[in-house]
Amino acid sequence: MTETATTPLTGKALLQKVKELSHLPRRETAKRCGYYTTTKNNQGRVNLTDFYDAILAARGIPLGTETSKDGRGREPTYRVSVHKNGQIVIGATYTQAMGLKPGDEFEIKLGYKHIHLIQMDREEDK
């Protein structure tokens, strides 16, 4: 492959081209839609991941675009698991959402298959 990469198709143009090239193998379709690069050694490399992501985005199904507010960590979920050392970590997202600060105290009440954390009144709030 000595061809130079063109600007990859996106949106409706990409979907139309994929439809036109439906008789070709996926790699060839991706290449003809502009999803390839040429390496220093003049080797062609098809970028299937980018191609698939572009197709999904063109169909209104973007994947992997959500990031946390500070760009780090995972998205918050309302599920946690017990670590090997027996601890359960809630995470900063939830403590920030509740406005908790270092040193805030909780009473732990155990129930049948549940744990209640009850925030203790702060000394300065009394």
Image (cartoon, rainbow, N blue to C red):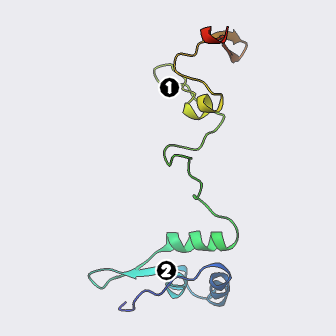
**Image coords of residue 118 (percent x, y):** 68, 14
The answer to whether the residues at label 1 and label 2 have Cβ atoms under 8 Å apart is: no
Residue type at tag 1: His
Is residue 10 in view from this perspective? Answer: yes
Q: Can you say which quadrant of the picture contains the C terminus?
A: top right
Q: Can you say which quadrant of the picture contains the N terminus?
A: bottom left
- The residue labelled by disc 2 is 35
Towards the viewer: 81 or 125? 125
**Image coords of residue 78 (percent x, y):** 66, 34
Q: Upstream in the sequence, badge 1 or badge 2?
A: 2
Mark 1 and mark 2: Cα distance apart in space: 42 Å
> Circle 1 sits in a helix, a strand or a loop, which is it?
loop
Q: Is residue 62 left or right of residue 103?
A: right
Residue type at tag 2: Tyr
Instruction: Specify the label residue 83 is tagged with.
Output: 1
**Image coords of residue 5 (percent x, y):** 43, 86
Towards the viewer: 29 or 89? 89
